Amino acid sequence: MHLRILLPFAVFVDRQHVQRIVVATTAGAYGFWPHRLDCVAALVPGILTYASEADGEVPIAVDEGALVKTGPEVWVSVRRAVGGVALEALQAAVEQQFLQLDEQQRAARAAMARMEAGLVRRIAEFDRGR
């Protein structure tokens, strides 16, 4: 298989001759082999592992995103990825960086929702005053 892991600003991994891929999805962990049927999967923050003869088993921490398999091509699109360190460090990166940032994003979205609601309320009050 040909694996590409894409970030918003770069290609993180581009490997040919990948033998298998294991990744965490919203429906649990799935393995992808060369002859598996084509599919699309929503990814959750976790560890993606791929194996090839040249590299052996390679773990990569990935943030949420999507995986698309069409024939021998596997495209993984995620917001963030970390690789090149021990598996334990990758698991810590997932827990500390990716999940913590999700909490920060939720807080920011809640603050934006409050601001938008306040703006709508003020516009409605202004419109009633006319």
Image (cartoon, rainbow, N blue to C red):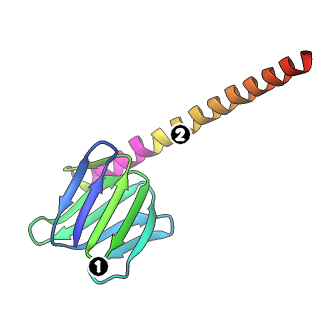
User: Dividing the image into 4 quarters, which one contains the C terminus?
Assistant: top right
Quadrant of the rendered image containing residue 68: bottom left
Secondary element under disc 1, as helix, strand or loop, is: loop
Residue 64, image x, y percentages: 43, 53
29 vs 4, left or right, is right
Q: Position of residue 1 (x, y in %)?
A: 22, 73
Q: Is residue 32 magenta?
A: no
At label 1, which amino acid type do we have?
A: Trp
According to the image, label 2 marks what residue? Answer: 103
Where is 115 relative to 76, above or below? above
User: What residue lies at 53% left-to-right and 39% top-to-bottom?
Assistant: 103
Look at the numbered disc 2 and give the secondary structure of its residue: helix
Task: State the image quarter where residue 67 is shown.
Answer: bottom left
Disc 1: which residue: 33
Question: Residues under labels 1 and 2: Cα distance?
Answer: 34 Å
SS majority, magenta = helix
Which numbered disc flags the more N-terminal residue, 1 or 2? 1
Residues at discs 1 and 2 in contact (Cβ within 8 Å): no
Q: Is residue 64 left or right of residue 57?
A: right
In the image, which residues are magenta? 88-98
- Around disc 2, counting alpha carbons within 10 Å, would you say few (fewer than 14), some (14 to 19), or many (20 or more)? few
